[in-house]
């Protein structure tokens, strides 16, 4: 099947098998290997990306379902060499160790912060229920998300970094094949 | 030089590793795409014990994209036997361990055929077209049943008993006879606990890529042990070691689960050799659960003798340890690592440890975070609580009266170790203060007297463990096949930048950051100017890799020694350059100076002079690089006090951790941020054993927890916020004073949680609850009924049962 997908600001046109998972399309065809596969049942969330600004598990979607949509991966978050505030907060709070869950965790955290601008501990923990981490015990991840919320408050930084979801969904596709 | 304006050691440096990990610029093994690469998929046995009577690959071979389908017969002549590096006794039974089953499968998940195809999808498609005929054999799952030898896992061995390993304090001359102590004791407590089977469940599934180009074999693997892997692959395949290069690129967690020489690593290599093309294998999560080694799985019968005043006298440990179907790299030695830790911080006069290793038709067990020590710590900390209950004493009081006092170090233990340092009083005092111990006891009394639906429990774990694996002579005495040293090199580059090569192999621990801090601190170079190279046998040719909380205590020490060598040589050259006596040269903040003068040469100046070698002292070799290898003369012994408060809903059996305090003494801390992170993660895994995780099999030996939907890895909402703090008693066994922190949280936390839950409900008549303490098990125990898991071998865990074989 023919699909056209905008990934991290670049539009790709490809022939794909109908059964191809979105995560395999990203990794194998587009070499977007920042997004990873941690399980095969949708439990771990390591493959989380944004589809039109909302988090989805890319191992639970077919590439053809992304046809005509915008996908943002961990590789598309930084702008002009500046990290997204959630990326910054993960580093500053030592919210990662092996880092394998981190791309999905960051993408889910951004989605969470779009709904909750100042989440308490429990809200963060519930909001990340679909993302497993084996290294950190989650404590510093929770701290990082709360720290990111502060960094993303109005006036805390340049506008384009304050709300990724808004930024992503308003973005026009550029480039292409 | 700015780097020593403040000490680098002890600084909460943000990690160097993070830049690539938070942006997706990582190199996981599965990311690799090589020209002409083939994909390998593994067909796994759905049955636990059977003869393979026929394999028909004709349909699979004809499928699109399939290059070849291979079975055990195809490898029989070349696959050899996967290595076990720890034959714990001279008469240990060790069955051949083929990477792929040839005529018999011994656990569900064992490899029986391979498809090699042009894509992973095509390879997976063809797996379904392979027809295998199995002739069922009796399945052996329960350890006690296995020891009756009615049905045999490996008929050729004649028994399911692998080995029996014994330590006896009287025979070793380090204590009295335990039977005498028990016979003359005022109090004897006997309990049986089950350490359920766990799955390490690293987040990155295992992956292997083998490249055959460039005149040698290059193996990328998601492994903790690139150096050991190279050695073992060479030994098994006969491929010359110098024609093998192993690379552990970014590795997504291990926890002991990637301390292995796996069937798939060997098979990938053999297939690449056969095909003359690069081959990749990446497992699915279910494959990982089914075939990567598991951990724990012991039955522990513990007998403790004491006086009525609470003084402990003797400790007898009788273990059954489930090996699974084969002996992997250190399978039989894992319970032996616990042998030295059951006595823990307490002053027993007598100690005897007998471990019987047993074969069953399950995936092999091997190292999982703590490896032997969590089991030991669980048993002794549960027993100290049982003794306190028996004597009606406060559980902390009974620990305090029996533990080694800080002024008694160094202390020779009844297990034959010498604990170099520690201060259990200090850690405990700090923990009790942070926890609000007395207030919580009052709250507990209130809830008990009011008959509150939600009861409060307080659990204690005053633990120690042994880290820094390991003195090579000790490993030799324990019949381990390798040494325990570690190595480091420092390359001083002409521009003043520094490359560090380490034999440790990080997979999430942050060695790049901490090793940079150590070098910056020692050499006075900026932290940013240090690059740490690891995990590639071509750059780091020698090492014993990362496990057993060894990297810093052993590998970090090698690095310090290498830095000392750099400085020693630089001092000689600096004296030559400044035309003074070497004794007058001082080194501070990265610069050499002549005492009492303003003559200065920076380390960078001296390194450049060594590099150009225009004017060196007579006989000095050009360059300023240095290597060092360190073999510790003792283990290190982290300790601490963990306190856990749980709220147990007596109507639903639900357990909620309401407060968790961990005060750990891990020696001198290099980077507090990283140490806290290690503790947090360790706690999560130990708590998970207490409350959530268990690998279970049905009566046919099928793993029934083979996905993350069934195997309950805790999520963020399942865990509390932890309150952590430290006391510091430097280790005396290494110049850094470091003890190790990778496993401490896991070792300490499980008994703290279990003791806490039992403390909440013991007054309601509950004597024990097996792990994991699920709501169903807690609720059932509260109904005064036997545990549904007890006696049901297929449940994968009998749990903690008392000596009479049942619960109240």
Image (cartoon, coloured by chain):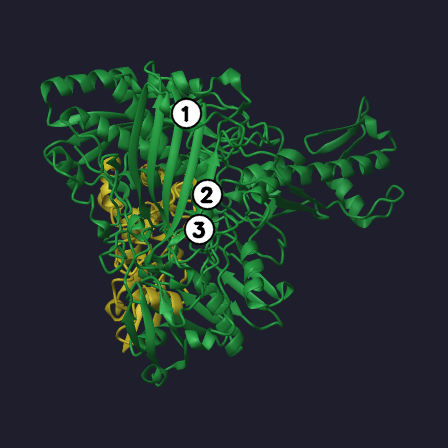
Chain colours: A yellow, B green
Which of the labelled discs sits on residue B331, or is there none? 3
Q: Nearer the viewer, mark 3 or mark 2?
A: 2
- Circle 2 sits on which residue? B165
Q: Nearer the viewer, residue B558 or B769?
A: B769
Tag 1 or tag 2, which sits nearer the N-term? 2
Which quadrant is the C terminus of chain A positioned in? Answer: bottom left
3D distance between C-alphas at marks 1 and 3: 33 Å
Q: Nearer the viewer, residue B47 or B556?
A: B47
Q: Residue B598 falls in which quadrant of the image?
A: top right
3D distance between C-alphas at marks 3 and 2: 13 Å
Tag 2 or tag 3, which sits nearer the N-term? 2
Q: Position of residue B432 (x, y in %)?
A: 34, 19
Quick check: B733 left or right of B136?
right
Question: Is B249 located above or below residue B464 in the figure?
Answer: below
For mark 2, give the secondary structure. strand
Q: Residue B45 falls in which quadrant of the image?
A: bottom left
Q: Position of residue B709 (x, y in %)?
A: 23, 54
Which of the labelled discs sits on residue B180, or is there none? 1
Q: Nearer the viewer, mark 1 or mark 3?
A: 1
Q: Nearer the viewer, residue B269 or B305?
A: B305
């Amino acid at each position: 099947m023919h699909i056209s997908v905008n990934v991290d600001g670049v539009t790709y046109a490809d022939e794909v098998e109908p059964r191809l998972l979105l995560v395999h399309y990203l990794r194998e065809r587009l070499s977007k290997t920042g997004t990873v596969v941690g399980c095969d049942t949708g439990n771990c969330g390591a493959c989380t990306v944004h589809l039109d600004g909302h988090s989805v598990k890319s191992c639970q979607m077919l590439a053809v379902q992304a046809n005509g949509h915008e996908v943002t991966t961990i590789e598309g978050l930084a702008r002009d060499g500046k990290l997204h505030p959630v990326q910054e907060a993960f580093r500053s709070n030592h919210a990662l160790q092996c880092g394998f869950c981190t791309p999905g965790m960051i993408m889910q955290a951004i989605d969470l912060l779009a709904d909750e601008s100042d989440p308490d501990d429990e809200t963060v923990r519930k909001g990340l229920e679909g993302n497993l981490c084996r290294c950190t015990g989650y404590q510093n991840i929770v701290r990082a998300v709360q720290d990111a919320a502060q960094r993303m408050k109005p006036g805390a930084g340049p506008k384009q970094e304050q709300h990724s979801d808004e930024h992503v969904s308003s973005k026009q596709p550029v480039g292409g094949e | 030089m700015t780097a020593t304006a403040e000490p680098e050691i002890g600084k909460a440096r943000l990690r160097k590793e993070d830049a690539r990990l938070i942006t997706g610029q990582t190199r996981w093994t599965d990311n690799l795409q090589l020209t002409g690469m083939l994909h390998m998929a593994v067909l796994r046995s759905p049955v636990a014990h059977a003869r393979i009577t026929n394999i028909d690959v004709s349909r699979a071979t004809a499928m699109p994209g399939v290059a070849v389908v291979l079975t055990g017969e195809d490898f029989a002549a070349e696959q050899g036997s996967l290595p076990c590096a720890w034959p714990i006794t001279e008469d240990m039974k060790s069955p051949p361990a083929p990477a792929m089953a040839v005529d018999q499968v011994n656990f569900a998940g064992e490899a029986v055929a391979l498809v090699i195809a042009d894509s992973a999808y095509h390879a997976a498609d063809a797996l379904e077209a392979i027809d295998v005929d199995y002739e069922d054999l009796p399945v052996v799952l329960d350890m006690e049943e296995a020891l009756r030898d009615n049905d045999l896992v490996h008929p050729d061995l004649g028994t399911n008993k692998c080995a029996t390993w014994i330590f006896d304090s009287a025979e070793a001359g380090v204590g009295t006879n335990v039977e005498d102590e028990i016979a003359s004791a005022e109090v004897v407590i006997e309990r049986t606990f089950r350490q359920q089977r766990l799955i390490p469940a690293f987040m990155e599934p295992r992956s292997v890529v083998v490249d055959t180009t460039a005149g040698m074999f290059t193996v990328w693997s998601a492994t903790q042990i690139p150096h050991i892997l190279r050695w073992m692959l060479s030994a098994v395949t006969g491929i010359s070691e110098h024609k093998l290069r192993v690379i552990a690129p970014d590795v997504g967690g291990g926890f002991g689960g990637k301390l292995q020489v796996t069937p798939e690593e060997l098979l990938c290599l053999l297939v690449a050799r056969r095909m003359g093309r690069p081959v990749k294998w990446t497992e699915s999560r279910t494959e990982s659960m089914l075939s990567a080694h598991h951990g724990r799985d012991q039955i522990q019968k513990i007998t403790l003798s004491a006086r009525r005043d609470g003084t402990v006298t003797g400790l007898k440990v009788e273990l059954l340890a489930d090996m699974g179907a084969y002996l992997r790299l250190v399978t039989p030695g894992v319970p032996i690592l616990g042998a030295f830790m059951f006595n823990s911080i307490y002053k027993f006069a007598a100690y005897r440890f007998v471990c019987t290793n047993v074969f069953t038709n399950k995936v092999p067990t091997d190292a999982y975070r703590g490896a032997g020590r969590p089991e030991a710590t669980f048993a002794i900390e549960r027993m100290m609580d049982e003794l306190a209950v028996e004597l009606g004493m406060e559980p902390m009081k009974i620990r305090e009266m029996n533990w080694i006092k800080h002024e008694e170090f160094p202390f020779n233990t009844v297990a034959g170790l010498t604990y170099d340092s520690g201060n259990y009083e200090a850690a405990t005092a700090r923990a009790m203060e942070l926890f609000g111990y007395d207030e919580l006891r009052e709250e507990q009394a209130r809830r008990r007297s009011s008959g509150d639906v939600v009861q409060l429990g307080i659990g204690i774990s005053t633990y120690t463990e042994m880290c820094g694996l390991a003195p090579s002579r000790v490993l030799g005495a324990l019949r381990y096949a390798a040494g325990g040293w570690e190595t480091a090199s420092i390359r001083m580059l002409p521009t003043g930048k520094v490359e560090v090569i380490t034999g440790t192999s990080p997979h999430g621990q942050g060695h790049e950051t901490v090793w940079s801090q150590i070098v910056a601190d020692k050499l006075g170079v900026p932290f940013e100017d240090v690059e740490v190279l690891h995990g590639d046998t071509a750059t780091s040719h020698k090492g014993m890799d990362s496990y057993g909380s060894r990297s810093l205590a052993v590998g970090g020490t090698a690095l310090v020694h290498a830095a000392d060598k750099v400085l020693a040589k630089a001092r000689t050259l600096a004296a030559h350059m400044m035309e003074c006596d070497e004794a007058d040269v001082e080194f501070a903040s990265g610069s050499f100076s002549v005492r009492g003068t303003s003559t200065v040469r920076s380390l960078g100046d001296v390194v450049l002079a060594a590099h150009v070698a225009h004017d060196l002292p007579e006989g000095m070799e050009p360059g300023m690089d240095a290597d060092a290898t360190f073999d510790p003369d003792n283990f290190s012994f982290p300790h601490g006090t963990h306190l856990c408060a749980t709220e147990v809903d007596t109507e639903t059996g639900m357990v909620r951790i309401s407060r968790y305090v961990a005060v750990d003494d891990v020696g001198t801390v290099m980077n507090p941020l990283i140490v806290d992170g290690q503790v947090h993660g360790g706690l999560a895994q130990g708590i998970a054993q207490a409350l959530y995780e268990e690998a279970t099999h049905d009566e046919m030996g099928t793993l029934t927890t083979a996905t993350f939907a069934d195997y309950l890895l805790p999520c963020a909402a399942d865990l509390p916020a932890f309150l952590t703090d430290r006391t510091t008693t430097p280790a005396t066994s290494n110049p850094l004073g470091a003890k190790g922190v990778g496993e401490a949280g896991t070792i300490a936390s499980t008994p703290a949680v279990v003791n806490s839950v039992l403390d909440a409900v013991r007054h309601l008549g509950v004597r024990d609850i097996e792990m994991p303490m699920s709501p169903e098990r807690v609720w059932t125990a509260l109904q005064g009924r036997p545990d549904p898991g007890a006696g049901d071998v297929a449940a994968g865990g009998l749990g903690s049962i008392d000596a009479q074989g049942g619960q109240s």
